[in-house]
Image (cartoon, rainbow, N blue to C red):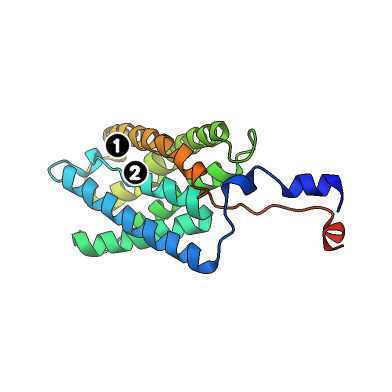
Amino acid sequence: MSKNTQQEIATPMNKVAKKRTPTMTITYIAALCAFTVILELVSETISFSLPRQFKISIVYFGWFLAGAICGPIGAVAVAGVADLISALILARGGLNPLITLSSCFVAFLFAICFHFTPIGKPYSTTRSMVATAIGAVLVCIFGTMGLSTFVLWFSYSKQTYLSYFIFRLFQIVPLIANVVLFYAFIPLLRKLRLYWRRPVKIKNVEKIKE
């Protein structure tokens, strides 16, 4: 095996990502689903008397953790299942597939940004924080103020879209709070080696086999 190939294999990613079995992956997804449901219940409780557009949501934190720990597909699974369970528990008029879709989109978008933003050394603390900021901005534009706002307006509001959009600008505040909370957990996630291991293209496969 050549020296270059050894360097490619011994990437920083290997220091922060454990090799997982399918059982471990399912366990992580299940645990994060339960945690995200709890966050949704807490969000509904503290926002009970507020209009929907002023809801104080901390569920983003669960989606961000799912994206970091389980990757894009795992994040979609967590967001989708958690939304289904939350709808059943809260009895909020039945499951709205459009809301579930927007939740999955936000989780997927953040996971893609977190793991595949080509900045700095893979999974270093600084790079993770920069990737989180980029992901949060895109989530805000295309998720919170984009797809989610349209879905909620289309499903529940009798206001004009512009009026509803302006009121929904308040959601930027809870989103920032979720980002700050996730920032606090980045060093812990790295220390415990909980990051999802993104696919890596290994060169010189013939030499590795030798």
For the residue marked with disc 2, what is the amino acid?
A: Thr
Q: In which quadrant of the rendered view does residue 172 lie?
A: top left
Viewer-nearest residue: 2 or 84: 2
Determine whether 99 is above or below 186 in the image. Answer: below
Q: Which label's residue is closer to the chain start, 1 or 2?
A: 2
- Find numbered disc 2 in the image and state the secondary structure of the residue it sits on: helix
Residue under the image location 49 percent in, 51 percent down? 69
- Residue occupied by mark 2: 149
- Any part of residue 47 in sight: no
Residue under the image location 41 percent in, 58 percent down? 78
For the residue marked with disc 1, what is the amino acid?
A: Arg
Q: Position of residue 89 (x, y in %)?
A: 21, 62
- Any part of residue 134 in sight: yes
Q: In which quadrant of the rendered view does residue 15 lie?
A: top right
Give the numbered dot on residue 105. none
Q: Position of residue 34 (x, y in %)?
A: 32, 59
**Alpha-carbon distance for marks 1 and 2?**
7 Å
Residue under the image location 22 percent in, 48 percent down? 42
Categorize mark 2 by other alpha carbons within 10 Å: few (<14), some (14-19), many (20+): many
- Residue occupied by mark 1: 168
Label tally: 2
Determine whether 27 is above or below 109 in the image. Answer: below
- Find numbered disc 1 in the image and state the secondary structure of the residue it sits on: helix
